[in-house]
Image (cartoon, rainbow, N blue to C red):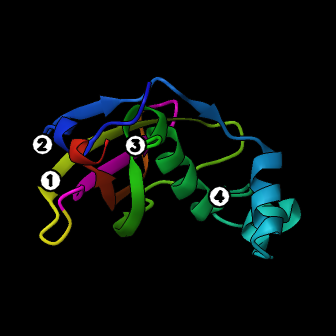
Amino acid sequence: MAGLYLEDFEIGHVFQHALRKTVTESDNMLFSVMTLNPQPLHIDFEYASKTEWGKPLVNSLFTLGLMIGISVNDTTVGTTIANLGMTDVTFPAPLFHGDTVRVETQVISARKSKSKPDRGIVEFEHRAFNQFGVLVAKCTRQAMMKSKAAA
C-alpha cells in the first residue's frame, strides 16, 4: 500500500497494523552494538540476571524505532517529507527477547502548512503492545507529509 497524503488522514482514525515482529536476542545485541550502547542491562545476561527483571531488557530505542517502523507501511511510506519530532515517549512495561510486538497508530491531528501549500503536518500517537496485550511503548510523532497538491 502506498503511503497516505495529508488529506487522507482522518482525525481519530486508529490503524491496527498487521505487520508484527518477534524480537530476538540478535536484534537487541546488534542494535545496542551499532549504537555504541554498552548498557549491561541489554547485553550482559549475567548482569541482567541479578536485576529485578532477571534477564536482559530490549533496548528502548530499538523498541521506539520498531514501533514507528511497523507503522510506516500503512501510513507514510513514500509520502513523508520529514519527521519533525517525537514527544511523550514512554515505556510503561519492559520488552524482552522472544516478545512479539504489535502496533496501533492513532491520527491525533492534521493541518496544512501555513507557508507551503504542497505539504502539512500530521500528528500520530503510536502504541506498541507485547503478545499479552501489555503496552510496552507509546509516543506522539509529528510528521511533515506531502499533500495531494504535490502529487
Q: How far apart are marks 4 and 2 (CA)?
A: 38 Å
Q: Name the residue under label 2.
A: 11
- Residue drawn at point x = 42 percent, y = 62 percent: 82
2 lies above or below 28: above
Image quarter where the N terminus lies is top left
Taking the image as shown, residue 32 lies to the left or right of residue 62, namely right
| Count of numbered marks | 4
Q: Residues within 10 Å of mark 1 (few under 14, many from 20)?
A: some
Q: How far apart are marks 3 and 1 (CA)?
A: 15 Å
Tag 1 near tag 2, CB within 8 Å: yes
Tag 4 near tag 3, CB within 8 Å: no
Name which residue type carries label 4: Trp
Which percent across, then down, holds residue 48?
77, 64
Q: Is the magenta stretch mostly helix, strand or loop?
A: strand
- Residue drawn at point x = 70 percent, y = 67 percent: 51
Q: Earlier in the sequence, mark 1 or mark 4?
A: 4
Q: Is residue 120 magenta?
A: yes
Image quarter where the C terminus lies is top left
Q: Earlier in the sequence, mark 1 or mark 2?
A: 2
Q: Does the magenta stretch include residue 51?
A: no
Any part of residue 129 in sight: no
Q: How far apart are marks 2 and 3 (CA)?
A: 15 Å
Q: Mark 1 points at which residue?
A: 109
Q: Read off the magenta span.
A: 117-132
Q: Mark 3 points at which residue?
A: 76
Any part of residue 104 in sight: yes
